[in-house]
Image: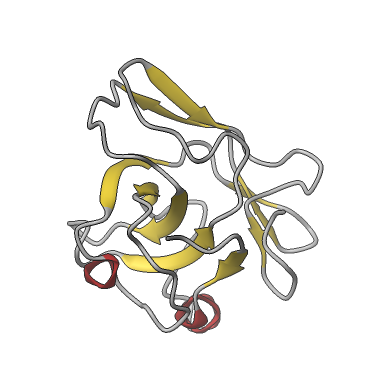
Amino acid sequence: MSTDINTLYNSAGRRFLRQEVDWESDDIRLFLMTSDYIFDGAHTIGNDLGPNIVANEIIPSRTTTADSKADAFPIEFAGLTSGRGVESAVVAVWQGSEATSWLLAYYGDVDGFPFTPIGGVYTMIVDEIFGGLFQLGGPPCP
């Protein structure tokens, strides 16, 4: 069962401080997770997520704001037909595979979650009130 929180993984801040992550130019993706994934802030790479990734998609048109928020256009998943329920989402830096990708942020409290894909398109809209997906030095989007 996922946790109803939205937060950064422990290693995310370190990766940004070491300039290992470039939010605007790296391949940053959103992983949709099953209800079997249990959040642990100590997780660092996709392999830590186990067999719980339903799908992943590139987060389009990423930008940063003056107050250190990571923003993006809505993320669209087309043709989700897995039948496995989606209960949370993870933002990760793609490193060639799901297993080796670096984990940045976890979302256990998302409008429209949980859901079971039955085909069609699912769109995750970035929180417009908060103004982004997460903020360095501040909380992730509600």
The image quarter in which residue 44 lies? bottom left
Seen from the viewer's position, the closer of residues 63 and 49 is 49
Q: Position of residue 35 (x, y in %)?
A: 38, 53
Q: How is the image coloured?
A: secondary structure
Examine the rendered structure and indicate whether residue 41 appears above or below residue 121. Answer: below
Question: Which image quarter holds the N terminus?
Answer: bottom left
The image quarter in which residue 17 lies? bottom right
Query: How many marks overall?
Result: 0
Examine the rendered structure and indicate whether residue 126 appears above or below residue 39. Answer: above
Q: Residue furthest front?
A: 1
The image quarter in which residue 48 lies? bottom left
Q: Residue furthest top?
A: 120
Examine the rendered structure and indicate whether residue 16 appears above or below residue 3. Answer: below
Residue at 50%, 84% (x, y): give it.
14
Q: Position of residue 121 (x, y in %)?
A: 40, 19
Residue at 59%, 60% (x, y): give it.
4
Seen from the viewer's position, the closer of residues 123 and 11 is 123
Residue at 44%, 56% (x, y): give it.
90
Relative horizontal placement of residue 33, taking residue 52 as reference (left or right): right
Question: Which image quarter holds the C terminus?
Answer: bottom right
Q: Position of residue 71 (x, y in %)?
A: 64, 47
Relative horizontal placement of residue 70, taking residue 22 as reference (left or right): right
Residue at 47%, 62% (x, y): give it.
22
